[in-house]
Image (cartoon, grey):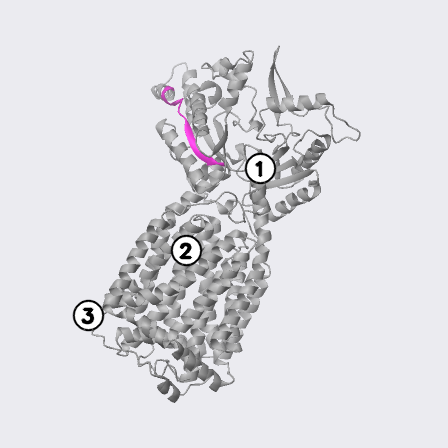
């Protein structure tokens, strides 16, 4: 074979025989698999789940699971009805609010017992009267705005306004300026047997908006279910971007290859990989999660990247019968081979570097599975399987299809290829200077310096959301606008952190320490920046206690004795959400201004510091259950006429531990976000180390040289930190969605370096110096690598016009990663090879550019 004296290895020869031994049979098998996968892929459904997105084994999520039934989960929907004239005290407004409340309760997924509005019986007021206390529903029974002919009087409005104030719901269920009211609804908890259809819930909520929003009233809806629905709606546009990406990719491949057939076959093989991946999803029992909609794009991009290398090598064989590393005169004298032989040789040369690159990408995605979140693991499995299937479509299907391909106008295409090969010779010659020892030293020094500055900047990347609102949607999206309106008019939103206080049974009457520490903790949190409001049982109990003392503000304190505590708390039922059935658990509801990563970290750190300073943390223990068991044992000892020594010991132990308190983080949607953020933070660096290790091991297996493996891997360190710096600049937080891009940046970024070094290695084995080998590598693969990066970058750059902000952000990041990885491989790989592989080689080679302009 021209241009190389190296003989193919046993592995390459075995794969060649396997692929080409019975081409028609293999094609029939692959076609049958494709047909089956199309059928399976057609059965895919959107599968969004709340608990899929949370790390269920995390400390906070253990609290979430323990108290989900007692205090609700984090899966809450808020529906706000706002009067456009700024005054909610209108009969029509209240009639609309009552009807809307009934409609929210009628949603099958809503938990009726946890729906709260002015018209639900669990929203009540208590007041001090001459004979003690009086209370009732905020909306009196006589107030019936939905009945025909009902006209409210001024006394009715005065009564309702007074009841709202007495119920202390201004800012929670009523706007601070009395321009609107809120309906809060928890959705039924999911379990293994019952999954919520979030798109259906979102559609029902949107139907409420369409029904009740008019020129007088506006309806604003936020919550996880609505967010999933809006993301799913935006994801429909992803399909159009996918087709646009395919079209642009084909067009650029056509420009590069000047062949309709080669461009079409490359895209077709990539599409087959995507179809197989989607079919495999269905076979594994997965669905399409709206948060993972970009995975098919990534598989398509990887398949095109490797397919472009295959058609590049195929052209070299069919036009010149080997490597295109000679002069123009030498290339003109060579004769090409037929399509079958060309496809065999292309596979033989690329099967090792292609397999190494694809397996490295597989390992990159597989490394994400260390994150213990079901959605992330599904994404990792999906992407890993997709890349694994790309091994078959690119190294089996595409070579077979090429072997049946007959190109027309061969002489014209051959001349065009010659122009391609010599057009950039001066650029390749200039770049080959990087392999000179002095230049290589400077380039590596620049790379190390750039890495250091990028690492300093990259350390500032936030784990979690870097911006207010839902990061997946644009700031001007209806959901984010609704969130801004609700947080502006109300003192709360869906950004709630619940800290659960665990104590002995009947702690609200028998544990003075538990009540006082909870009250002091609430005051402490109210003074943390980002906290809008804190609601606890002790706070409201103080108001009730003052009511028993003629409402005097001086008595708005927590009493010390049990009888007075019982008096202050006896009126609170479990449906208030302030305590469980035996008052051994009390949630502290913390309403935050937003869910930005810095806000969450600030509040969570304050909670951890307070509980550490006040001996209120018992790690890994459900103190409520522990104290309940010990309370029973201690009571049995006290009831015994003649207690045993063991019983006496239990009673003495109970006196020491009965006032213990455990502040457990955390339920509420902010608790979920905090758990996700901490999970990502814990594994991010480990994941990167695993990715780098995988790259190193695969390159070591392929090239049998640890120094070569190091040279291939090192540019990834720089590009990864540059990617982190870009995230800081774009205010993109490190979340489960962005981890895919990081993994892709490492897994796919190494492809460029692997293909360049594989060609350099072949040339060095043929006796060429390192600098000449690098020139040969650029001359034969440089254009293909450049076009690969350009094709991928242009395809994903179109995403900036997506209806989903996170897709636009990922488009920018992927464009950056594709281009910068290519540049880093071209610039830093030869410099590292010079310093690590041949630092003392006498390299006097100079390029012959005499034939560069002979066209």
The x and y percentages for residue 451 are 32, 55
Image quadrant in which you'd find residue 492: top right
The x and y percentages for residue 280 are 51, 61
Q: Earlier in the sequence, mark 3 or mark 2?
A: 2
Task: Indicate which disc residue 840 carries.
Answer: 3
Tell me which residue sits at (71%, 23%) in the image.
Answer: 156
Q: Residues within 10 Å of mark 3 (few under 14, many from 20)?
A: few
**Magenta segment boundaries in residue numbering:** 655-667
In the image, residue 644 above or below residue 301: above
Residue bearing the label numbered 2: 742
Q: Secondary structure at mark 1?
A: helix
Tell me which residue sits at (40%, 48%) in the image.
Answer: 461
Residue bearing the label numbered 1: 486
State the residue in front, 80 or 311.
80
Q: Is residue 723 rendered to the left or right of residue 221?
A: left
Q: Residues within 10 Å of mark 1 (few under 14, many from 20)?
A: many
């Amino acid at each position: 074979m021209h241009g190389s004296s190296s003989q193919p290895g046993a592995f390459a020869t075995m794969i060649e025989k396997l692929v080409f031994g019975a081409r028609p049979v293999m094609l029939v098998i692959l076609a049958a698999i494709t047909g089956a996968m199309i059928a399976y892929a057609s059965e895919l459904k959107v599968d969004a789940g709340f608990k899929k997105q949370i790390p269920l084994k995390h400390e906070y999520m253990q609290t979430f699971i323990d108290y989900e039934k007692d205090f609700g989960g984090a899966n809450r929907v808020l529906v706000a009805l706002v009067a456009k004239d700024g005054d909610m005290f209108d009969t029509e407004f209240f009639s609309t609010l009552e009807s809307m409340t009934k409609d929210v309760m009628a949603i099958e997924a809503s938990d009726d017992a946890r729906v709260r509005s002015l018209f639900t019986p669990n929203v009540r007021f208590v007041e001090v009267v001459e004979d003690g206390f009086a209370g009732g529903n905020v909306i009196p029974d006589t107030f019936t705005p939905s009945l025909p002919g009902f006209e409210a009087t001024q006394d009715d409005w005065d009564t309702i306004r007074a009841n709202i104030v007495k119920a202390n719901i201004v800012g929670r269920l009523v706007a601070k300026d009395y321009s609107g009211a809120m309906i809060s609804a928890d959705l039924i908890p999911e379990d293994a047997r019952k999954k919520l259809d979030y798109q259906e819930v979102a559609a029902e909520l949107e139907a409420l908006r369409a029904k009740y929003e008019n020129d007088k009233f506006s309806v604003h809806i936020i919550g996880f279910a609505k967010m999933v629905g809006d993301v799913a709606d935006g994801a429909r546009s992803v399909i159009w971007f996918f087709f646009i990406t395919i079209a642009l990719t084909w067009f650029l491949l056509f420009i590069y290859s000047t062949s309709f057939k080669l461009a079409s076959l490359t895209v077709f093989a990539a599409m087959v990989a995507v179809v197989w991946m989607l079919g495999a999803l269905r076979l594994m029992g997965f669905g399409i999660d709206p948060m993972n909609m970009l995975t098919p794009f990534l598989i398509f991009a990887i398949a095109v990247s490797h397919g472009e290398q295959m058609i590049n090598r195929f052209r070299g064989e069919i036009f010149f019968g080997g490597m295109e590393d000679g002069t123009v005169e030498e290339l003109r004298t060579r004769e090409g081979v037929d399509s079958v032989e060309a496809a065999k040789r292309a596979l033989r040369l690329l099967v090792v570097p292609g397999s190494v690159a694809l397996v490295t990408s597989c390992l990159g995605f597989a490394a994400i599975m260390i994150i213990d979140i079901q959605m992330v693991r599904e994404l990792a499995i999906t992407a890993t399987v997709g890349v694994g299937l790309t091994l078959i479509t690119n190294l089996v299907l595409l070579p077979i299809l090429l072997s049946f391909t007959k190109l027309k106008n061969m002489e014209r295409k051959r001349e065009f290829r010659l122009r391609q090969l010599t057009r950039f010779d001066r650029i390749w010659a200039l770049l080959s200077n990087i392999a000179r020892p002095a230049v290589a030293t400077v380039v590596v020094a620049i790379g190390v310096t750039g890495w250091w500055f990028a690492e300093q900047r990259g350390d500032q990347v936030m784990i979690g959301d870097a911006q207010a609102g839902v990061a997946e949607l644009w700031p001007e999206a209806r959901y984010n606008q609704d969130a801004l309106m609700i947080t502006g008019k109300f003192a709360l939103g869906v950004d709630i952190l619940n800290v659960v206080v665990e104590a002995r049974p009947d702690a609200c009457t028998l544990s003075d320490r538990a009540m006082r520490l909870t009250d002091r903790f609430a005051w402490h949190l109210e003074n943390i920046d980002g906290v809008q409001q804190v609601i606890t049982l002790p706070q409201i109990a103080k108001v009730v206690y003052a009511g028993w003392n003629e409402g005097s503000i001086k008595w708005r304190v927590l009493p010390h004795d049990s009888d007075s505590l019982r008096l202050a708390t006896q009126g609170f039922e479990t449906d208030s959400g302030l305590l469980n059935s035996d008052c051994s658990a009390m949630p502290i509801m913390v309403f935050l201004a937003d869910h930005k990563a810095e806000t969450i970290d600030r509040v969570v750190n304050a909670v951890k510091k307070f509980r550490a300073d006040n001996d209120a943390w018992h790690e890994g223990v459900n103190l409520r259950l522990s104290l309940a068991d010990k309370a029973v044992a201690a009571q049995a000892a006290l009831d015994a006429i003649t207690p045993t020594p063991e019983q006496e010991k239990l009673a003495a132990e109970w006196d020491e531990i009965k006032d213990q308190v455990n502040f457990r983080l955390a339920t509420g949607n902010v608790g979920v976000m905090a758990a996700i953020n901490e999970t990502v933070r814990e594994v991010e660096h480990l994941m990167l180390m695993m990715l780098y290790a995988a790259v190193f091991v695969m390159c070591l297996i392929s090239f049998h040289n640890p120094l070569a493996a190091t040279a291939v891997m090192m540019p990834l360190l720089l590009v990864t930190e540059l990617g982190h710096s870009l995230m800081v600049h774009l205010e993109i937080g490190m979340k489960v969605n962005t981890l895919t891009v990081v993994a892709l940046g490492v897994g796919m970024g190494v492809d460029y370096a692997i293909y360049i070094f594989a060609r350099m290695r072949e040339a060095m084995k043929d006796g060429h110096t390192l600098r000449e080998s690098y020139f040969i590598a650029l001359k034969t693969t440089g254009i293909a690598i450049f076009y690969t990066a350009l094709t991928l970058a242009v395809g994903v750059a179109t995403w900036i016009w997506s209806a989903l902000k996170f897709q636009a952000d990922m488009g920018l990041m992927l464009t950056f990663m594709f281009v910068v990885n290519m540049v880093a491989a071209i610039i830093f790989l030869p410099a590292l090879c010079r310093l690590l592989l041949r630092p003392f080689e006498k390299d006097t080679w100079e390029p012959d550019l005499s034939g560069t302009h002979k066209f």
